[in-house]
Amino acid sequence: MTIQTDTPFNLKRRDFANDFVWGCSTSAYQIEGAIAEGGRVESIWDKFAAQPGNIRDGSSGAQACDHYRRWPEDLDIGKELGLNAYRFSISWPRIFSGVGTSQNEAGLDFYSRMVDGMLERGLDPWVTLYHWDLPQYLQEQGGWANRATVDAFVAFTDAVSRRLGDRVKNWITHNEPWCTAMHGNLDGVHAPGLKDFGTALQVCHHVLLSHGLSVPVIRANVPDAKVGIALSLHHLRPATESQDDIDAMFRHDGLRNRWFLDPLYGRGYPADVLQLCGDAAPVIHPADMDAIAVPLDFLGVNYYFPEVVKNDPDNLPLRSRVIAFPDCERTAFGWEVSPEGMTALLQRIQRDYHPGIIYITENGSTYDDVVNEDGAIDDVQRKNYLIRHLHAMRDAIGHGVNVKGYFAWSLLDNFEWAEGYLRRFGLTYVNFQTQKRTVKLSGRWYRDFLNHR
Ligand code: IFM
């Protein structure tokens, strides 16, 4: 079911606090291109995308949005939209070309120039350190499953925060560790393409540990830093009201949400899930859990869709299964559209974890855009998705959740991982042949909303 109706413009910027952060998010591999320039070395995504069958349209991020060269134009779009913040990620393979090598000044200079460009345009820079593009040389030594990668990440964090910390005050260590671990190492649809539950859980643990050990490094280099992590979190519903489905939903929640939130907020890994994991449980050193539970300045929530969970005794280890709920509104990706799921999720996080400050660090939708004869893209559905989720966020704030900012995913159409260029999430349309940018109706709506005071 697709709802085509337009949504009335009854939401105002002044419904939110004056100091509310309004931004867009991007990530390095998805937009930069220029994979062999400025001393950049191979990333796991270069290698993964080169293997036939891994990316649906056979593409890669080799060119993407050519943002490496076109970033001034892209930041101009951010300014034109009226954003006051811009979230981007650092490509680790641009910064270190090997373990123990000296940092690559050309890579750091690139980001330093871009940060200056943001500040010149009134965009507060929000750095994400890891958005999935691990250097391939680290994968060859086991990647995130190897504890040594944690040390390498801390060194990377140190180099970047020393260089940019005089101007960048908002830091996100990792984007969506669930995806890093599970898509990369369990279902294998993301780089490095492995399929092993034990590896996925070990990866997960090392990613969280690298987060915990990096936070004090950022704070030492940037005394006024605000540091957090961005998690992909889901509101869950049981397929039926049966106790079996409710229990299955709880187990699914254990790996989807609690596996990250519990250790970050000092409770360790959920005991019920650890028990179900059996031998696949990660190796944990004595001080690890304390390191992971380092207090944060904020929690980044990436919200896209809810999940409906059914009991499935055959589907080990969690004995649960996500089902496609019938007759619901979906994006072109098949993701259920549920703004009320966002409100419920935010309330649940607030109630169960008291994270202090929350930022929506990603939220967005993909639809099949049509370019009109006059070149305009009237993406009514994406615009409505955006408006309805802003309403949902406002509802959550009304219920006492301390949300202080919102970043739309994404500023630009980009390389959508295993889907290649088949899925467009941008508020700005990118013609990947000509690299022409056109702000879509959704982006124009966001601009009007942000400029209406
Ligand atoms: O494109 C991704 C992004 O890299 C991480 N969060 C979800 C987005 C849409 O799938």
Image (cartoon, rainbow, N blue to C red):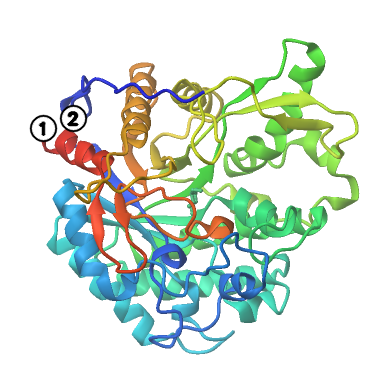
In front here: 203 or 218? 203
Instruction: Answer with the quarter of the image where residue 88 lies.
Output: bottom left
Q: 440 above or below 143? A: above
Say if residue 169 shows up in the picture: yes
347 sits left or right of 126 in the view:
right
Mark 2 is surrounded, within 10 Å at the Cα level, by few (under 14), some (14 to 19) or many (20 or more) other residues, namely some
Q: Label 1: which residue?
A: 452
Position of residue 263 measured from the top left corner of the image (x, y, whole percent): 64, 43
The total number of labels drawn is 2
Instruction: Answer with the quarter of the image where residue 222 lies.
Output: bottom left
Determine the CA span between mark 2 and mark 1: 7 Å
Give the secondary structure at mark 2: helix
* Residue pictured at 57% horizontal, 70% vertical: 45
Position of residue 164 measured from the top left corner of the image (x, y, whole percent): 31, 70
**Callout 2–callout 1 Cβ contact below 8 Å:** yes
249 sits left or right of 232 in the view:
right
Position of residue 84 measured from the top left corner of the image (x, y, whole percent): 20, 48
In front here: 93 or 348? 93
- Quarter of the image that includes the C terminus: top left
Q: Amino acid at mark 1?
A: His
Give the secondary structure at mark 1: loop
Mark 2 or mark 1: which comes first in sequence? 2
The tag on residue 13 is 2
In front here: 195 or 290? 195
